[in-house]
Amino acid sequence: MHGDEKWRSLAARIKDWGRELGFSAVGIAGVDLGAAEAGLQAWLNAGYHGEMDYMAAHGAKRARPAELVPGTCSVIVVRMDYLPVAADASANLAAPQRAYVSRYALGRDYHKVLRNRLQKLAERIAGETGAFVFRAFSDSAPVLEVELARRAGLGWRGKHSLLLSREAGSWYFLGELYCNLPLPADPPTGEHCGDCAACLAACPTGAIVAPYRVDARRCISYLTIELKGAIPENFRPLIGNRIYGCDDCQLCCPWNRFAQHTKENDFAVRNGLDTVSLVDLFAWREDDFIQRLAGSAIRRIGFERWLRNIAVGLGNAPPSPAVLAALHNRADDPSALVREHVAWALRRHGD
């Protein structure tokens, strides 16, 4: 078997092995991301990354895979569906006494699930090729995930900046296996957003400032997850009952008619987070937070920010004796951050 044919054959088998391991799609990208590097730098120069200093710290390394993992000459990109069978998201958003948690965080933390599965894929490849240089990622290092997935033919970048595919919408995680195997790259797919601008109109805080450009400083996912301090007061009423992340730009996307429910038990809803009330969550003690959310992506924000977010949700909830009692119970919370957001919520209710 000639060299090119050998690598084409291996690439085809890698895709089969990936699907056997539970990935919904597998593609291969090259490592020349020079065209994307300029766009990344412009985004950073505009300050759109907010307090996510790690975005600027790693800078160009995101667009240079061989600098991150020396020897990298191709990237295996995988997609894994995460949309769980859960209470209707739009109905939950329309019930302001409930807490809304982004669909991706309703189950187990995806980072470990994807990296463990990518490790198994690498072991399967090594059984065929012998030892090779590789490193697995899933939103865990300076990697241009969407750009690599686009170049690997897994979809196109939507105007909300997420990856879209005709057969699966956008409810999925991405993972990458950087490697030193000269695998042939797949061709990119076409773009199919057309004139649609539903995601721009749907964003509660106007974070999608232009097609394909998101100002993270305005994004509810950033405000409730990445931001460490106080949430700016002008954004608090717009957050509604979203206490961890936001899905509005995906919920309105026509391509998500074709989204697939996940087959992974790890991503199934835990702790009733698809219907739980804000009042009930605000009553959790810190050990409840730690124990109940063990293995959840939500744990990364810590208990203080968790309470901060719920206090905002309670400030936006319809006033009731239960809501006011919940807020008063934490009016003297040990955390100044929590106390400030509780005081704001009480002022919202004229109390």
Image: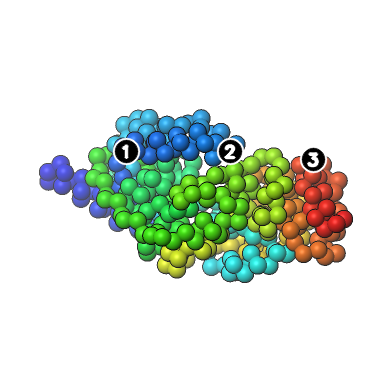
N-term-proximal mark, 3 vs 2? 2
Say left or right for 142 vs 313: left
Residue at the (70%, 51%) spot, across then down? 236
Disc 2 crowd, CA 10 A, few/some/many (<14, 14-19, 20+): some
> Which label sits on residue 50?
2
Image marks 2 and 1: residues in contact by CB distance under 8 Å: no
N-term-proximal mark, 2 vs 1? 1
Question: Circle 2 — which element?
Answer: loop
Along the line of sight, which residue is nearer the eye, 322 or 263?
A: 322
Question: Between marks 3 and 2, how big is the CA–CA gap?
Answer: 22 Å
Q: Position of residue 83 (x, y in %)?
A: 50, 62
Visible in this render: residue 234? yes
Q: Nearer the viewer, mark 2 or mark 1?
A: 2
Question: Circle 1 — which element?
Answer: loop
Total marks drawn?
A: 3
N-term-proximal mark, 3 vs 1? 1
> Which label sits on residue 140?
none
Question: Between marks 2 and 1, how big is the CA–CA gap?
Answer: 27 Å
> Which label sits on residue 31?
1
Q: Nearer the viewer, mark 3 or mark 2?
A: 2
Disc 3 crowd, CA 10 A, few/some/many (<14, 14-19, 20+): some
Residue at the (64%, 42%) spot, across then down? 227
Q: Position of residue 156 (x, y in %)?
A: 37, 53
Q: Position of residue 141 (x, y in %)?
A: 47, 38
Along the line of sight, which residue is nearer the eye, 79 or 234?
A: 234
Residue at the (39%, 36%) spot, across then down? 37
Visible in this render: residue 123? no
Where is mark 3, residue-wise? 336
Amino acid type shown at disc 3: Ala
